[in-house]
Image: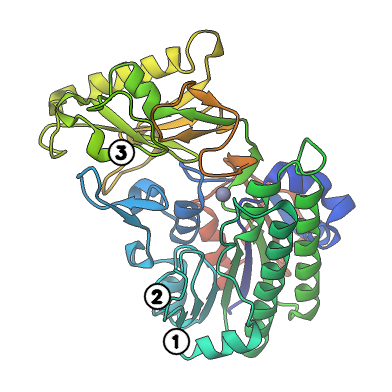
Amino acid sequence: MRRRVLIIGLDGAPASGLFARMDSEFPNLARLARRGTFGLLRSSDPPITVPAWACMFSGKDPGELGLYGFRHRYGPGYAQQQIVHSGLLPRGMLWDWVARRGQRTVLLGVPPTFPPPAIEGLVVSCLLTPKGASTFTHPRGLQARVADIAPDYQFDIANFRELEDEALLEQALSGLRARFRLARELCRREPWDLFIMTDIGSDRVQHGLWGVSEGSGWGQAVRSYYQEVDREIGEWLFELADDVCVWIVSDHGAQASRGGFYLNEWLRRYGWLRLRDDSVCAPVLPLAQVDWKRTVAWAEGGYVGRIYLNVRGRQPEGVVSQGDIERVREELREALRSSAGGGASRIPMQVYAPEELYREWRGYPPDLFVYADGLRLRVFGGVGAQSLLSDKNDTGRDRANHHPDGLYICYDPGAVAHGPGQVMPITEIRSYWEAQLAGQLPNLGA
Ligand SMILES: [Zn+2]
């Protein structure tokens, strides 16, 4: 026996906001949840789009994948970084498992699927697709159909931090409609056993419009986006065969942003990072200005901060001896916890080493991950700022940061309704999909 599984991914959809308003504002999601089960999906560390989706569909954590972020470090050199691409995914992704069973998958916008991998089925690549990319589908012949069905298809919302509020919402909504139009058309016309669509618009709208124009919580603009999501899902469900298992999932949650913390500036002020010229002021760390021979650690910014120790024999101009890594790391962690922000404005810092987060770790993980104030603060990589704290974002308007609590809603036509289900670790959800595709009825009860 085989059953079909449809997974609709809403990037960054937070459990708190969505479940609290489900009954009043999202009737189609509420109906699915009532007839099935729903709960928190605990994101990866770090809780960001890449690697979180990769964790969900591989069943591996970021350490096992060697994928720690959107920018991927491929060597120990200071500048050895590239944008993540699909070639970094391991064998044995959920769609590979499906193919081995002689089944077929459709992937639409699932990160990271650029370049589109040659799977058994169809792929329309993800938000990582560069502007003007010559190949964004597998097989290539699908491109003409995408252009035909959804000429206005958007891989991502370009410049979402620069758009005016109204323009951002409008562009996100038209992107959403195009994505669902394409998804429903492929869903209808193509044979599939597993169908995965993810929408990045929810994440972009939250970053741009969180709190607009209500001041607290999601805000009216974000809620109107999710209402449209709910309506699109409702129309899709209406035309689906009644044997399909339907999942709504998010890769991480979101929360209001309080601004950011200048981590490299903090490292510089406390002597861990040395610049050739202390008057340098730059929005990202100018690697050429770093006096590596006197630098113990440097960092990268983002929703999560990443600290790298400058280790002798590992980095080109390393100074920390291999035997000192652990001691230096603990000193740094202690200093960051006790003095970040300076004086009265101390910021709660959660600082993690890879072995505290992962079963194993491959590639080039940071030596420490920094979650500033439970991720309410973004971490800035720049140097030269007057204050270590800013209530603004460094890369343009950003009203939301990420949160570890994503969500899932599962409607399994063969199972009885469960109501609230267990908290789902992101690396475990795949086993439920495998069970359903194999014709079993997995138990999601709390
Ligand atoms: Zn995001």
Q: Name the residue under label 2.
A: 117
Q: Which label sits on residue 73?
A: none
| Colour scheme of the picture | rainbow
Reading the chain from its start, which is encountered first: label 1 or label 2?
2
Q: Name the residue under label 1.
A: 139
* Quadrant, the N terminus: bottom right
Tell me the CA gap for discs 3 and 2. 35 Å
Between residues 357 and 110, which one lies in front from this camera angle? 110
Q: Does any portion of residue 144 appear in the rendered image? A: yes
* Quadrant, the C terminus: top right
Q: Give the structural element (helix, strand or loop) at label 3.
A: loop
Asked whether mark 2 lies closer than 8 Å to ligand 1, one says no
Quick one: which residue is furthest to the right in this view?
24
Q: What residue type is labelled 3?
A: Pro
Q: Mark 3 points at which residue?
A: 286
Asked whether mark 3 lies closer than 8 Å to ligand 1, one says no
- Rendering coords of residue 332 (x, y %): 32, 20
Q: Does any portion of residue 191 appear in the rendered image? A: no
- Rendering coords of residue 338 (x, y %): 44, 12
Q: Give the structural element (helix, strand or loop) at label 2.
A: loop
- Rendering coords of residue 161 (x, y %): 59, 50
- Rendering coords of residue 295 (x, y %): 21, 26
Between residues 180 and 288, which one lies in front from this camera angle? 288
Image vertical order of residue 126 relative to residue 394, above or below? below
The reply, left or right, for residue 84 in relation to residue 2 is left
Contact between marks 1 and 2 (CB within 8 A): the answer is no
Between residues 8 and 204, which one lies in front from this camera angle? 204
